[in-house]
Amino acid sequence: MGNILLGVVADDFTGASDAASFLVKEGIKTILYNGVPDKPPGVEGEDLAVVIALKTRTERKDLAVSLSMEAFRWLKDNGARQLYSKYCSTFDSTPEGNIGPIIDAVLETFGYPYTIVAPALPVNGRVVKDGHLLVNGVPLHHTHMKDHPLTPMWDSDLAELLRPQGKYPSLKIPHDKLALDKAEILRIVEDFGRGKAHFYVIPDYCDDAHAGKIVEVFGDIPFLTGGSGLMTGLGRKYRADGSAPADIVASGTDGKALILAGSCSVATLRQIETFQAAGGKSIKMDPIRLADGTQTKEEIWRQIDASDGEAVLVYSSDRPEQVRQAQQAVENAAHMLEQAMAWLARMAERHGRHRIIVAGGETSGAVTQALGYNAYLVGQSIAPGVPVMVPMENRRLRLVLKSGNFGQEDFFLRAIDMTRGDTR
């Protein structure tokens, strides 16, 4: 069995691949599992990170906690030195959970006094300043996330976001206190924690220097939480401890590409427009037409299969007002769209389209469940946090799974280019 340096549990598949990509970039061999494995990692004697992707971001709270704890227990049972709860860099949580309840369950189950809450990813414009989460300089609840159809954000203060869903108090470490030396910061933490069963520490995190300091001060505690930003610093720490560099799998393969976009983020909408402006073939999947039978997934597949182009984009992405209208008109519209996208991914694989590119966390989760692969080698990144992945059971396939908010405007074109050609 491999030596698990870090065990990460992510609340969706794109978040898992995001975290894994930063570890790979730092030379840490990383295996990503779709769900809790039923056996130890099949790697003997190597240092590695293990990332477990769940689908718990919008799951019912009790089920989200139960699934997460199953994953954390598997990691502990298989010798993971350190645990990490990975959630979105825009927090993406309703007042009921699930971030706080999962953190609390880990703290209580394993007897850890505290953890840090660090969702920032500065390379993608997400920073924590004075305890507030900002996206490209704008407080979270003033960004497009305030209109998210599933997890609308009502505040940018992380302590306030945690208050209704977590049981314990928060200690903020603003940037001026983060400039103190490690011993002084830990004294502040110790003083705050005196007499408290558990608590959360929210450090400011605006740049790579802050990330380095957070890892210096808190990098050895047994349980961390946050976005993928800290993975770079943790990877460097493990390498400094003597971990061996990872072998990077090839990005290219044969076959045509299929792009499936279910995200309604501003970034994904622009990426769709850029692909279309470049002359790419695209097909709009309409939930109302799917529901009344005037559009079918079989009809969409026939259009894909008949295309002479290298890539076809199928998208259900739309503006928030159109999404709300569809949700009102069609019961379980989101689930119906996800399942149709997943069916198309299966058809693509069966018919030799070995490059499948997906935008949106929920859509990615449905696609990976449909394809049925449970373990992936993580390769090079197309954009920060978005790697090419190769199923260990099918080394011919290349999967690119993008969180809705991630990637450049020409992301789809870059993904097509990077996955092109059998370079093995």
Image (tube, helix red, strand yellow):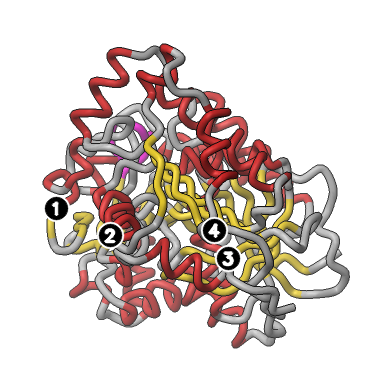
Note whether 337 is above or below 19 in the view shown: above
Cβ–Cβ under 8 Å for marks 3 and 1: no
Q: Which residue is mark 2?
A: 277
Q: Which badge, 2 or 4, is on the more N-terminal residue? A: 2
Tell whether position 366 is magenta.
no
Three-letter residue code for mark 4:
Val
Quadrant where the image shows the C terminus: bottom right
Q: CA distance from mark 3 to mark 2?
A: 24 Å
Marks 1/2: CA–CA distance: 32 Å
How far is mark 4 from mark 1, CA to CA? 29 Å
Q: Of callouts 4 and 1, which one flags the residue occurring earlier in the amino acid sequence?
A: 1
Q: Nearer the viewer, mark 2 or mark 4?
A: 2
Q: Secondary structure at mark 2?
A: helix
- Mark 4 touching mark 3, by CB under 8 A? yes
Which residue corresponds to mark 4? 400
Q: Please name the residue shown 43% across and 31% down the image.
A: 58
Which sits earlier in the primary sequence, circle 4 or circle 3? 3
Q: Which residues are magenta?
A: 162-169
Which mark is on residue 139?
1
User: Horizontally, is 145 left or right of 250 in the view?
Assistant: left
The answer to whether 405 is drawn above or below residue 68 in the figure is below
